[in-house]
Amino acid sequence: MRVLVTGGSGFLGSHLCDRLIGQGHDVICLDNFFTGRKQNIEHLLGNPRFELIRHDVIDPFKFEVDRIYNLACPASPPHYQYNPIKTTKTSVMGAINCLGLAKRVKARVFQASTSEVYGDPAVHPQPESYWGNVNPIGRRSCYDEGKRCAETLFFDYHRENGVDIRVVRIFNTYGPRMNPDDGRVVSNFIVQALRGQDITVYGDGSQTRSFCYVDDLIEGFLRLMEQSETVGPVNIGNPGEFTMLELAEVVLKKVGGKSKIVHKGLPADDPKQRQPDITLAKKYLKWEPKVPLEQGIEKTMEYFRGEV
Ligand code: NAD
Ligand code: UDP
């Protein structure tokens, strides 16, 4: 098949491109390099089945493709809050452009949505049926509401125009090729520990997240895209839930060194807890994560050793 991956030079997108090329598909990687890096996909550049196109998803594009994975959007809070209006445009216009193309060429189109659609959840763990608890006017809203609007567009194009959609809600994912300056917690803690700097825990560190290793996540993407039992939304994530203090301790144990934990202010609207209910992924995709946190942290640490 010919497959378009928007955001294909980012952290998740580059791993997805690798898997698709490995399966024998032709891949078009579209990216504006806001947070993506050429080094993530440079090993694919000489491959005749791989094409790289610098383009912004807010501007229309046309390709004859069978599948579209829409991943283009900055994912870390510092990056998506850097230009919040652009973040909303990227989610909303990017979704419209992908859906318009899918409608025209009859491609199946996949949306990388997020656990952020649940906001600061009042239901725990979060099933797909939970509608969420999202602040519409806060610092995180450009991302949360942009992704919620993108989901709305996906389901309206599906109902109104019969577009063949798949929607995944991704929970915190980590692994090699995260940008060391990305600002997300796993990359921050590992990079700080490797550099012997203080580990910055925001707030008292009692807030929780559930961390999925990238290889597990991408397997879930491919299974969701190629099955026909459900269009989603389907949660993909690792139900293992950790406080940020526990995560800091795992990283310190693995990396070693003399870094100390220091506390910094908690960012606005920081969700207190997050854990995926993966009943639907198990049922429809026969998927569950395989890589435990300590093992995933080790692999990620090896990558960052060569980076920092
Ligand atoms: P990332 O920042 O590494 O990748 C995003 C990619 O999109 C980058 O290559 C960036 O340059 C590109 N991009 C951004 N704006 C663009 C635009 N306007 N036009 C074209 N390209 C643009 O982040 P990631 O972790 O790889 O996330 C990929 C997708 O998965 C995002 O949509 C994100 O919202 C979603 N997601 C990720 C996580 C996670 O934990 N990694 C969790 C939930 C959702
Ligand atoms: N966090 C932290 N130290 C850091 C970066 C993040 O304690 O250096 C916390 C952050 O406040 C949040 C959690 O880690 O509670 C996850 O943050 P991240 O930005 O990775 O993802 P998100 O908040 O979008 O889930």
Image: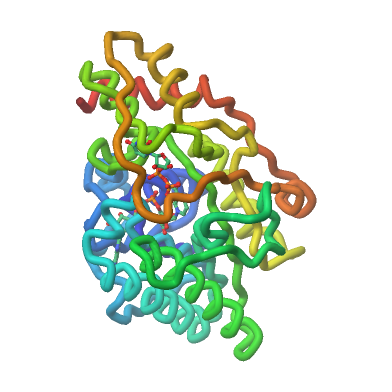
Q: Position of residue 105 (x, y in %)?
A: 49, 81
Q: Is residue 98 above or below residue 220?
A: below
Kindly tell me whether residue 35 is visible in this rendering. Answer: yes
Question: Residue at the spot x=54%, y=72% of the render?
Answer: 151
Residue 87 occupies which quadrant of the picture? bottom left
Q: Position of residue 180 (x, y in %)?
A: 26, 36
Looking at this rendering, what residue extends furthest in the top direction?
257
Question: Residue at the spot x=41%, y=24% of the render?
Answer: 248
Closest to the observer: 70 or 179?
179
Quick one: quadrant of the C terminus?
Answer: top left
Kindly tell me whether residue 114 is visible in this rendering. Answer: no
Q: Is residue 107 above or below residue 11?
A: below
Q: Is residue 238 left or right of residue 140?
A: right
Question: Residue at the spot x=64%, y=51% of the render?
Answer: 223
Q: Is residue 32 left or right of residue 68?
A: left
Q: Position of residue 54 (x, y in %)?
A: 22, 64
Closest to the observer: 38 or 211?
211
Q: Is residue 37 left or right of residue 47?
A: left
Q: Position of residue 235 (x, y in %)?
A: 63, 53
Closest to the observer: 254 or 46?
254
Question: Residue at the spot x=26%, y=63% of the render?
Answer: 53
